[in-house]
Image (tube, rainbow, N blue to C red):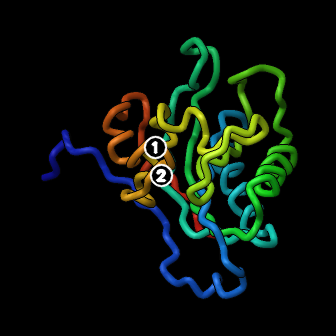
Amino acid sequence: MSDPTVQPVPTAVVEQVDAADITLSNPKRAVIALGSNLGNRLETIQGAIDLLEDTPGVRVKAVSPVYETEPWGVEPGTQPSYFNAVVLVKTTLPPSSLLERGQAIEEAFDRVREERWGPRTIDVDIVAYADVVSSDPLLTLPHPRAHERAFVLAPWHDVEPEAQLPGLGGIAELLAGVGRTGVAPRVDLELRLPE
């Protein structure tokens, strides 16, 4: 008989073979957070992952489990809940080009930017790029609020538990500091690594 107090553990999809890396010259590691609370959330996040993989100079190396979370920065009950995930990529694109690609993916899914923290079909955020620390207003690295957000830290921890958020410390410690309240694993849902 199973213990009802034990939470099911979500599983990540990680590509172990680095054969695809042969096509990339001196790739950098990047962490990208994906979130959706409008439309078919799971299908949209999978579509964004597939579009990342279809980008020249980008290889998706790991896909986190799906988490369901309440919207951040707004009154409870004013928006649908989010599905969140994190992908690890290796890329030869510079951060600015990876940002442009993320914004193009958002546009492909009709992302509307009318209000801060408004509902969205898809949000594509670069959380970290190699060990780059930058205060560029167009792309601050690492993401300026990633260390406060369990919906980023929990899925990232699932695919890379020993990871460091540049300048801020280990994600395991950061996640322990913010806790997992309001971040529910959706073990019934699964994202796939692009083929």
Q: Looking at the image, is 45 positioned above or below residue 18?
A: above
Task: Give x and y (percent) for residue 173.
Answer: 33, 43
Residue drawn at the location 31% of the way across and 38% of the way down: 176
Task: Give x and y (percent) for residue 19.
Answer: 60, 87
In this view, the residue farthest toward the left is 1
Q: Looking at the image, is 26 positioned above or below residue 177?
A: below
Task: Give x and y (percent) for residue 1.
Answer: 13, 53
In the picture, the disc for residue 156 is 2
- Type of amino acid at the residue the image marks with label 1: Leu
- Residue 85 visible in the snapshot: yes
In the picture, the disc for residue 153 is 1
- Type of amino acid at the residue the image marks with label 2: Trp
Is the residue under label 2 in contact with that under label 1 (CB below 8 Å)? yes
Residue drawn at the location 63% of the way across and 41% of the way down: 35
Task: Give x and y (percent) for residue 122.
Answer: 72, 41
> Mark 1, residues whose alpha carbon is within 10 Å: few (<14), some, or many (≥20)?
many
